[in-house]
Image: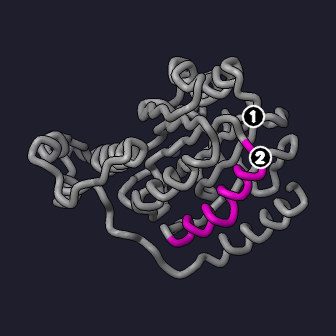
Amino acid sequence: MLAAELLREGGVAHVPGAGTHHALPDRASGFCYLNDPVFAVLALRAQGARRVAYVDLDAHHGDGVELAFRDDPHTLVLSVHEEGRWPGTGALADRGAGQVWNLPVPRGFHDDDMARVLDHLILPVVEAFGPDAVVLQCGADGLLEDPQSGLALSNNAHAAAVAAIRPLSPRLLLLGGGGYNPWSVARCWTRLWGILAGERAPGTLPDSARAVLAGLRWMRRGSGRAIEPEMRWIDTLEDPPRGGLPSSEVRARLGMLRARLRVWQ
Ligand SMILES: [Zn+2]
């Protein structure tokens, strides 16, 4: 709500602690109590934004947000998420009132696949919708090191998405979301903050930042043992690129959504 107020005249707000996209109207769900992206969209509308685009890059489908706005032609809801993963919603064929776009992607989805999704789906769909505000949920659980998904992104994918989506509307509200490896979450969202602030990520982090990352502890589930971080999780913000051959599933599904976009425009 505060972020929406700050965006009344335009600009950018970043709320990394937000992005709880699974909460439902009558109950908590998926580690989410209140659905802050839904409240953010409603608050932006109350501030005068007529058309709001919600884009969700979390590894899980943003089911609570789609449910809230699936019948609202003034709210675009676009989600890229791992197929077969909880909560099991977000089918390719779901359209809502015509402005719901879902792209389920297979395990191993990497930076090069995401670059194609960005160029051939996210950017043209958001551009065609012409939003007054964009709410971008940048869950970090699609990163390779995250234990809650089978996706294989680097934080370069999230960085490229934020940089490309920023110019598409006068207001951008960037949210966090899922993310269960504390080092990859902290590095990803710090990097995104830097992009919005126009700061370049240093090649090697200064001692003060390295001390914060070195101080994190993450216990392996059920074992009682702490996970030993890789050195680059302590020393750097930028991941090495993680590309690969194009996924045939992603290519085929993109083709179907592109055909729909040509009719929709
Ligand atoms: Zn998630």
Q: Nearer the viewer, residue 29 or 158?
A: 158
The CB of the residue at mark 1 lies under 8 Å from ligand 1: no
Q: Work out whether residue 37 can be spotted.
A: yes
Tell whether label 1 touches label 2 (CB within 8 Å): yes
Residue type at numbered disc 1: Arg
Position of residue 224 in the picture relative to residue 45 (left or right): left
Q: Is residue 102 above or below residue 172?
A: below
Q: Say if the magenta span includes residue 1.
A: no
* Residue 127 lies in the magenta-colored region: yes
Q: Mark 2 highlights which residue?
A: 129
* Numbered tag placed on residue 51 in the rendering: 1
Task: Using a 10 Å C-alpha cutoff, classify the residue at mark 2 as few (fewer than 14 neighbours), some (14 to 19) or many (20 or more).
Answer: some
Vertical position of residue 94 compared to residue 40: above or below = below
Across and down, in percent, residue 210 comes to: 14, 47
Q: Earlier in the sequence, mark 2 or mark 1?
A: 1
Name the residue rendered at 64%, 42% in the picture: 169
Q: In the rendered view, would you say 247 is above or below 17?
A: below
Judge from the rendering whether residue 68 lies leftward or rightward of residue 197; answer left or right: right
Q: Could you say where residue 231 lies in the image, as x and y percent from the top left?
A: 16, 60
Q: In the image, what residue type sits under mark 2?
A: Phe
Task: Give residue 206's position: percent from left, percent from top.
Answer: 13, 48
The disc placed on residue 166 is none
Q: Residue at image x 48%, y 67%?
A: 111
Magenta: main secondary structure equals helix
